[in-house]
Image (cartoon, coloured by chain):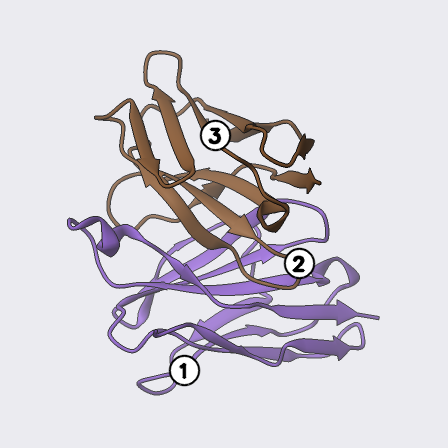
Chain colours: A purple, B brown
């Protein structure tokens, strides 16, 4: 069964450093998302991406964040200068497209990257 | 307006019992309501979902009840098993490809 994959599974970095989190969405999917989950809290939306551009972003997704789809398979989240409060689990998700059947509505989540900022 | 409120925060149920988790929303533009199951160290996985044109959807031991007028929906897990122990998130979104808005999660423990 196709799945979303993410690397690395755990990233430890020093405050102020840049990190790149990588995702490989399901191959025929068109819509891509990043969410984050601070330990013990709810999953929060960061950004969505379609047709090589950002389609929606939350107030969390400030100028320190950027996303890119550098080739036909990878989808990356970059944090330019990490802060302590960026420590969280980051989930990538992908979706095939809008409309019915209902399978098209489902966002499939990857296993996440745990980011620890020291 | 964008919030989805979920309760309880944690739940302990005896094996074989019924687990019930409740969610409420404010935004009437939401039209898709999924429930996700998350095991420690894993990403959320879709469990079951409902649209507001039906009041109930059942898949195996899992049932969503939906009350459009009250803007509430709930997950019922019948014959709860220890393997059901996980964190459950309700979520909602508008139509199309908009992002999901998640509830805060319920940590379910099913004890033998």
Question: Residue at left 64%, top 46%?
Answer: B82
Closer to the eye: label 2 or 3: 3
Residue A48 x, y percent position in the rendering: 39, 59
Mark 3 → mark 1, Cα distance in angstroms = 37 Å
Please tell me in which quadrant of the rendered image residue B103 appears.
top right
> Dot 3 lies on which element?
strand
Question: Residue at left 27%, top 33%?
Answer: B51
Residue at far right of view:
A118
- Specify whether disc 2 shares its chain with disc 3: yes
Mark 2 → mark 3, Cα distance in angstroms = 21 Å
Question: Does any portion of residue A96 appear in the rendered image?
Answer: yes
Tag shown at residue B40? 2
Closer to the eye: label 3 or 1: 3
Give neighbour class at mark 1: few <14, some 14-19, many 20+ (Cα, 10 Å): some
* Chain identity of mark 2: B
Residue A68 x, y percent position in the rendering: 42, 77
Quickly name the residue at label 1: A74
* Chain identity of mark 3: B
Tag shown at residue B76? 3
Question: Does any portion of residue B10 appear in the rendered image?
Answer: no
């Amino acid at each position: 069964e196709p799945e979303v994959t993410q690397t690395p599974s755990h990233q430890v970095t020093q405050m102020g450093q840049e990190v790149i989190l990588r995702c490989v969405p399901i191959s025929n999917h068109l819509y891509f998302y990043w969410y984050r989950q601070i330990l013990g809290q709810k999953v929060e939306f960061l950004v969505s991406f379609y047709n090589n551009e950002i389609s929606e972003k939350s107030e969390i997704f400030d100028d320190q964040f950027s996303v890119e789809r550098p080739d036909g398979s990878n989808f990356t989240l970059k944090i330019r200068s990490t802060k302590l409060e960026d420590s969280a689990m980051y989930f990538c998700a992908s979706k095939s497209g809008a409309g019915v059947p209902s399978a098209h509505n489902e966002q499939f989540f990857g296993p996440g990257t745990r980011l620890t900022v020291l | 307006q964008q919030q989805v409120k979920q309760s309880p925060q944690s739940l302990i149920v005896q094996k074989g019992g019924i687990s019930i988790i409740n969610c409420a929303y404010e935004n009437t533009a939401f039209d898709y309501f999924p429930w996700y199951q998350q095991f420690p160290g894993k990403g959320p996985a879709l469990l079951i979902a409902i649209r507001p044109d039906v009041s109930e959807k059942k898949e195996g031991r899992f049932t969503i009840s939906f009350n459009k007028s009250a803007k509430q929906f709930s997950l019922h897990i019948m014959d709860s098993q220890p393997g059901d122990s996980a964190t459950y998130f309700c979520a909602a979104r508008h139509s199309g490809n908009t992002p999901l808005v998640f509830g805060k999660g319920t940590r379910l423990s099913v004890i033998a």
